[in-house]
């Protein structure tokens, strides 16, 4: 049987075509560094942020399938900018990497060291968080604005008019956080709702719980909280349960396992599945294609779907 030739993906092709195209395997043992935003827990051997752990798992599966080597480069914390800059700088100095896939801590601050890597012959694909550079191979991500809008519209559809809503944001220097917040605001316009408070909890559970506790004391009429990631949503849920507010509608973003369990238990209402494992796989595939034949791609390679996960959809999947 004659093998089917592997088509190439040019800059004008859609991401849908990239996903449908047979995946390329490596002709040599390329070494790709997979840099993530959070730290590795030495006790568990897993990345602390479940979303990035899911991405890392996807990267390892993809590397085995593609015949490449992928090496994890964790960070000290999700807001440790200088630490990630130093780690990338040390990587460049070692001169052993063929490519870099990076979930950047900061969309602006990481640009100089990333462009230094590119100048040193290390092509770079950004994952999840865009970088303000036009020298990347591409940015693989999720349509955060549209997903935020989908969530905002869904929340608006669950609430009566004049309901009070609060928003837990990610860091303002993360482009994905900005896009999610803007999407939430547009989506919420589908209902006659009152946005009484917004705050930044740096993607973290404990700050989100503290903020939510303060909100519940200040706004006893609060009806819903929209969080820009699941870890903050879980923190909000902890505070709501402690305050006896089981009626508070809380949503997240990422579809990590603890959030799915909380949805099944009725502690969260919904989340968005941004498929970080698929993002990682696609990032490594496009980076491999660039390394093998210098293929070029659109500046943004965005996953085409924004799946909303609710208790109802989980029940459907279980059947």
Image: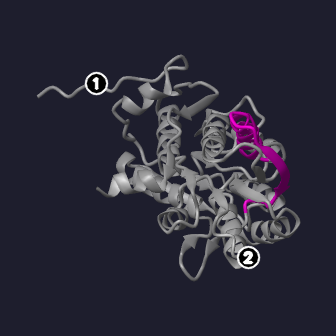
Does 318 appear above or below 181?
A: below
Q: Quadrant of residue 206?
A: bottom right
Q: In which quadrant of the rendered image does the C terminus lie?
A: bottom left
Q: Quadrant of residue 49?
A: bottom right
Front one among 187 and 272: 187
* Residue 185 belongs to the span the image colors magenta: yes
Question: Residue 303's x, y, as percent?
Answer: 52, 36
Q: Contact, CB < 8 Å: mark 2 with mark 1?
A: no
Front one among 290 and 211: 211
Question: Residue 187's x, y, as percent?
Answer: 68, 36
**Tag 2, which secondary structure?**
loop
Give the residue at x 60% y 24%: 298
Left or right, 129 with respect to 312, comes to right
What's the magenta region? 174-203
Q: Pointer 2: what residue? A: 243
Q: Earlier in the sequence, mark 2 or mark 1?
A: 1
**Residue 115: image tag:** none
Q: Residue furthest left?
A: 1
**Tag 1, which secondary structure?**
loop
Q: Residue furthest bottom?
A: 43
Label 2 packing within 10 angstroms: few (<14), some (14-19), many (20+):
few
* Residue 177 belongs to the span the image colors magenta: yes
Give the residue at x 62% y 70%: 48
Q: Pointer 1: what residue? A: 5
Front one among 197 and 298: 197
């Amino acid at each position: 049987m004659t093998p089917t030739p592997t088509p190439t993906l040019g800059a004008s092709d859609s991401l849908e075509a990239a996903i449908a195209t047979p995946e390329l395997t490596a002709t040599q043992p390329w070494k790709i560094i997979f840099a993530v935003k959070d730290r590795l827990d030495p006790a568990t051997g897993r990345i602390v942020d479940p979303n990035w752990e899911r991405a890392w798992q996807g990267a390892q599966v993809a590397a085995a399938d593609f015949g490449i080597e992928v090496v994890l480069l964790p960070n000290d914390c999700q807001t440790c900018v200088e630490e990630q800059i130093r780690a990338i700088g040390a990587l460049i100095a070692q001169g052993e990497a063929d490519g870099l896939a990076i979930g950047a801590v900061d969309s602006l601050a990481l640009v100089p060291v990333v462009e230094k890597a590119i100048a040193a012959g290390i092509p770079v694909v950004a994952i999840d968080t865009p970088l303000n550079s036009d020298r990347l191979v591409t940015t693989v991500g999720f349509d955060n604005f549209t997903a935020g809008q989908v969530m905002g519209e869904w929340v608006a559809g669950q609430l009566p008019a004049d309901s009070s809503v609060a928003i837990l944001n990610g860091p303002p220097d993360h482009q994905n956080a900005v896009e999610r917040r803007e999407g939430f605001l547009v989506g919420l316009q589908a209902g006659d709702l009152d946005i009484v408070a917004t705050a930044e909890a740096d993607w973290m559970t404990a700050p989100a719980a503290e903020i939510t506790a303060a909100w519940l004391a200040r706004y006893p009429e609060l009806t819903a909280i929209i969080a820009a990631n699941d870890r903050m949503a879980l923190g909000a849920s902890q505070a709501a349960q402690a305050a006896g507010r089981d009626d508070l509608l809380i949503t997240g973003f990422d579809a990590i396992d603890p959030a799915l369990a909380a949805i099944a238990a009725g502690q969260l209402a919904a989340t968005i599945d941004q498929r970080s494992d698929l993002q990682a796989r696609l990032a490594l595939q496009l980076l491999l294609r660039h390394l093998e034949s210098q293929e070029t791609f659109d500046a943004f390679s965005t996953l085409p779907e924004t799946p909303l996960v609710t208790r109802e959809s989980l029940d459907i999947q279980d059947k």
